[in-house]
Image (cartoon, grey):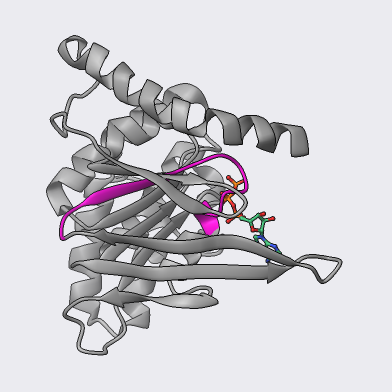
Amino acid sequence: MRIVIEEVGKTFLDSKKREVTALQNINFSIEEQEFVVLVGPSGCGKSTLLNIVGGLMSPTNGSVYFEGTQGKKPNLGIVFQEIALFPWRTVYENVIFGLEENGASKQEQQEKGRHYIEMVGLQGFENAYPKQLSGGMRQRAGIARALAIEPDLLLMDEPFSALDAQTRTLMQEELLTIWNRTRLSTLYVTHNIQEAVYLADRVIVLSRHPGQIKSIIQIDLPKMGRDQEEYRSRFEQYADQIWQLIRHDAQEALKEG
Ligand SMILES: Nc1ncnc2c1ncn2[C@@H]1O[C@H](COP(=O)(O)OP(=O)(O)OP(=O)(O)O)[C@@H](O)[C@H]1O
């Protein structure tokens, strides 16, 4: 599905009731089967924008259109950094949660539950509870739950940032493999530039105060296997280009704490 973000702005009131413009004049689209990554320093409005696209927050200005839904509510799969699994449900029960909510038949729940548990590599853990799983496994379960409803758009907000570096690298690889099988339109938030270049078809770089689009960069590297030796120098060029765009804002963010 194609999603259009048009003239989106968001203003908050801070603790002293002063207006803070978190987002201003945001225009971009997420094309059918496109993986778009939002990147920018702390406080540039990445999460706010993701929440607005996901309908969890309303914009002060502008709109988000889901093309072809004819006014019907789009189906959204959401994965957050904090693993929001229900602790009292098993992996299987967590994965089929959205299907139950959508009124899917028991047979559909079973088929899709099994399919997506297998896709994220959690077969054998269907009856485990979240507390019995490692952080990486919990994130896999969260991803399976988001995928099971076969969403029109997959939204991911720093899904791997609480994981250790090695698990994170492995999960990035797995996410690409999963994405390659599902080809879902995806909006992914990170402040990790390497992760952005590794995953994205396009990287949207945000500046802060107010959060605006600084640049949109198409990553012209093959989608799979970008970390191979032959692409290393182009990979690093993209990463450097993005860092140069963010550097000043990141320094300012650091000063403000
Ligand atoms: N509910 C709120 N009330 C007031 N200000 C808010 C609220 N939510 C966000 N903000 C402000 O809006 C700006 C953008 O915040 P947001 O969390 O979207 O940024 P971010 O890029 O996701 O940051 P980080 O990378 O640190 O998570 C910040 O200045 C933040 O303080």
Q: Examine the rendering and report whether any part of residue 100 can be seen.
A: yes
On the image, which quarter does residue 241 sit in? top left
Please indicate, yes or no, whether residue 204 appears anywhere in the rendered image: no
Q: Nearer the viewer, residue 142 or 218?
A: 218
Residue 86: x and y, percent?
A: 53, 63
Q: Is residue 40 magenta?
A: yes
In the rendered structure, which segment of residues is drawn in magenta?
Answer: 32-47
User: Quick check: 135 above or below 80?
Assistant: above
Q: Position of residue 96 (x, y in %)?
A: 34, 68
Q: Is residue 78 left or right of residue 222?
A: right
Q: Is residue 31 left or right of residue 175?
A: left
How many marks are shown on the rendered structure? Answer: 0
Q: Residue 229, percent across and down? A: 20, 9
Q: Residue shown at 46%/26% (left/top)?
A: 244
Magenta stretch: includes residue 111: no
Residue shown at 16%/53% (left/top)?
Answer: 182
Quadrant location of the C terminus in the rendered image: top right
Is residue 134 depicted above or below 95 in this figure? Answer: above
| Residue in the picture at 29% in, 37% down | 199
For the N terminus, the quadrant is bottom left
Determine whether, in the image, residue 61 is placed left or right of residue 2: right
In the image, farthest residue toward the right: 16
Ligand 1 placement by image quarter: bottom right
Q: Going by the picture, which residue comes out furthest to the bottom? A: 71
Picture quadrant of residue 13: bottom right
**Residue 227 percent coordinates (x, y):** 25, 19
Q: Residue at x 37, y 81 (%)?
A: 101
